[in-house]
Image (cartoon, grey):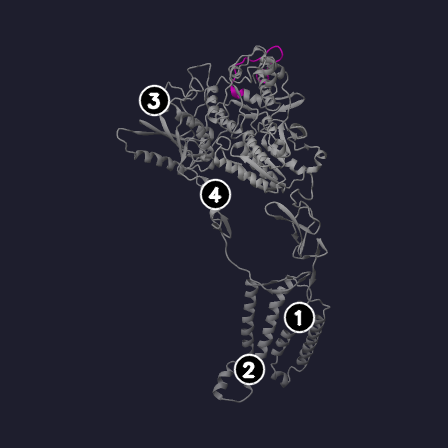
Amino acid sequence: MIYAISKINLPNISIGYDIYDTCGDVGLALRATLQLLKNQSDPQSCLVPADAQFDLPEPETKVVIGERYSEVSIAVARLIALSSVAQISYASTSELLSSKFKFPTFLRTVPSDKYQTRGITELVKIFHWKTVIIVGSDDEYGKYGSDSLQVNFNNENICIEFVHILSADFTTNNNSMNQTELTELLEKIQNSSAEAIIIFTKDTNAEIILEAAIRHRVNRTWIASDAWSSSSNIAAMQDIELAGEVFGFVLKQKEVPGFKDHVMSMFNGTNNTILRDYQTQHLLSVNQSEEERTQHLASYIDQDESYGVYLAVRVIAEGLRRLLKCNDHRCERRSSFTASELLSEIQKVNFTENNTQIYFNSDGDPSLGYDIVYWNRSEGIIIQTIGEYSPEGKITVPTGLFSHLINDTVSVYNCSKKCKQGQGFTLKGKCCGVCVPCASGEISDGNSSACKRCTDNQYSIAEQRDQCFNKMDEFLLWTDPFSVILSFLAVVGIIATVVFAVLFAVYLKTPIVKAVGGYLCFLELFALLTGFCLTFTFIGKPTEKIHCVGVPLFGIAFTLCISCILANLLQIFLGFKFDLKGKSWIKKLNMPLVVVTIIFGIQLGLSVSWLTKEPPHPDNKSLDQTILYNWRSGRSGGGSSGWLERQKITISGENGLLRAYSPGNIIIGGLFPIHLTTNRTNTSGPLSCRDYDIQMFLRSQVMIYAISKINLPNITIGYDIYDTCGDVSLALRATLQLLKNQSDPQSCLVPADAQSKLPEPKTKVVIGERTSEVSIAVARLVALSSIAQISYGSTSELLSRKYKFPTFLRTVPSDEYQTRASLRNPESKLYCGNHAYLF
């Protein structure tokens, strides 16, 4: 970085630097960031303004390069955005950092893990690997990378045998618990059928895993993330060849022009604290000559992250050139500008460096891809570049060199990848595939597809389980012998009915016709004729309209005929002499038209209600190779259905941040999202909130009420409560206010030296925040002053890591216990309608 800055040539402009050693620690990085954000040209200026609604003072540092690890960069990016200072990382690849809403001033000279995980997925596809294992770590880099890999593999139907997330203290604490975790991980890998193990974590974790793999003789194929794929320490491990094949992704490797010569000249007379520390404490051997020491040091120069640092400086130089309107001889604008102006110009840079076009997309990610490397084991370990992956999704790998690793039919663990036609792909265990013949009614085109059932109207044959055939329709055909006989009898009945109707019409006035009913006979013959005609509706392929009407009409016609016969029987019955008392009662029923009308009306009402409530419907039965068309009465439920429309009630509050303050000997800070959202469109200027949350208002009043009930002799408890609007930047502004030493208005939050402790604040404890995302950002900052933070709503399991959040506590259980409860009692369900959900 120092070398690249010295190469910036802007007329009448000198570029300085302020570099801190963060030790890869979030707390130290935040302390250094607070130092960088100070207005160093005005020693009396304090970093924290008088009011949380106002901007922080303009810092002399206009841009920050770093950090290496994504976890540290995320914490720094939260804080640095408050001053609209650009942050350019040379190695942080976490996909989370691409969110401009959360990290508006963050940029990087390395691609996002989004592209790396896509590249790893494409590499797995090229080698036809169908089963993988993912090993990540409990930090932003490993967790988000593992999650992205899972999404990509699931979309490509690549089976993930298991995902293992290393504990947060996997590297720092070499205790028995970590050894147990390591042993269990290697046993699972050894017993798995995975064709590739992807280790997506930092190099220190990968070194421990591979060292144990060598010790336990675990020989597999490994895919390295960019964090360790070019690690010289891991490549130099004893017997590393025994671990197996290693492929990896590294940033586009290019050499920083002239830097090696600069190192060989012992930094060309450059003098700075970091260089002096190296010269005094890290000399390799007093017996070595200066030339040997410099040559050994030059061997450590890498071509990925070093080039990323160089590009970051080049981007800044190009941004300054655009902002100050400089040419080779002069700059039109003076060097007085704000950090936000420089940020805006850096985001627009577009230049060519070493035949590569450099620019940033809308997410702050560069236009760079990855090199694909292979650890050649022929003579020791030689890390060779064998291909590349571009952000556009194009991958090039010489697969011919690795034909021994490619088999698209069966894996080395005897797991099938493809099946023959008529065989279905099923899993034996989690990911190991086997081929089984498809059952009757199922087909498969082979490859890695499972047997699929044919539709209800199709079938498959044993000799050809790769194709479905349409089933034959089976119903009462007109040519069927039963249909012929039935039709013949119906026609005979129709003819006989018509003949009798003609005879009755000719002899209508004769006594014999009158004796059998007279005009009522024609109604009876009409009903018979209708019944005979309806016989033909039951032959042929059933249709909904004809059969829906035919069934009830037949019942109506049959009832009409029977009612006419009953009326005739009553008339005949009265023609005989019997008991006069009974005869007198029977005479009252001698009303044929009334009898027919009543019986016919009852049947008609029942038929209409049947058609309305339970109409007939098709009841087709699917047999092995045929479909039997049938018709039966159905059931259609009538009823009413409705729904409740829920309306969210919001109460608009006044614009501006709310604050409640009460003085006391001891101050308790409070962070509550009393408003739900902000109107933030940029990172500078006053922010206002909207959408009042009345429940959060009441919770803030609970805190005030509870404090009023504290009874300590001669001690008054005050409070200082801020409305964060659920926004990280507003919460950090409020936290900076709480960390000030309010009893000494002249005291500044940031000490003169990054190694010194922050001044003791009057606020001794902070209650809040509600959401885990905001609490994580606040916890990073309050830990610098060793202030307890007690959350009433943040449940993220990550906050339980005391190594990361030493001063955080909460009054709600961690999500860890909720997930344990669901695993301990998997039968516990929450029912909603017809659906059941596991809690």
Q: Which residue matches tag 4?
A: 819
Camera-nearest label, 2 or 1: 1
- Is residue 413 placed above or below 112 in the rendered structure? below
Q: Is residue 332 magenta?
A: yes
Q: From the viewer's side, name the closer residue of 790 and 678.
A: 790
Considering only order in the chain, which callout, 4 or 1, is on the residue closer to the N terminus? Answer: 1
Residue tagged 1: 535
- Mark 2 vs 4: CB contact within 8 A: no
In the image, residue 573 lies in the stretch drawn in magenta: no
| Residue 54 drawn at (x, y percent) | 44, 23
Between the residue at mark 1 and the residue at mark 3, the CA separation in whole angstroms equals: 103 Å
- Report the disc number at residue 743: 3
Tell me where residue 294 sits by quadrant.
Answer: top right
Question: Residue 432: percent from the left, percent from the top?
Answer: 62, 45
Instruction: Residue under label 2, please give it.
Output: 570
Disc number lying in front (1 or 4): 4
The range drawn in magenta is 321-341
Q: Which mark is residue 410?
A: none
Say which quarter of the image contains residue 207.
Answer: top right
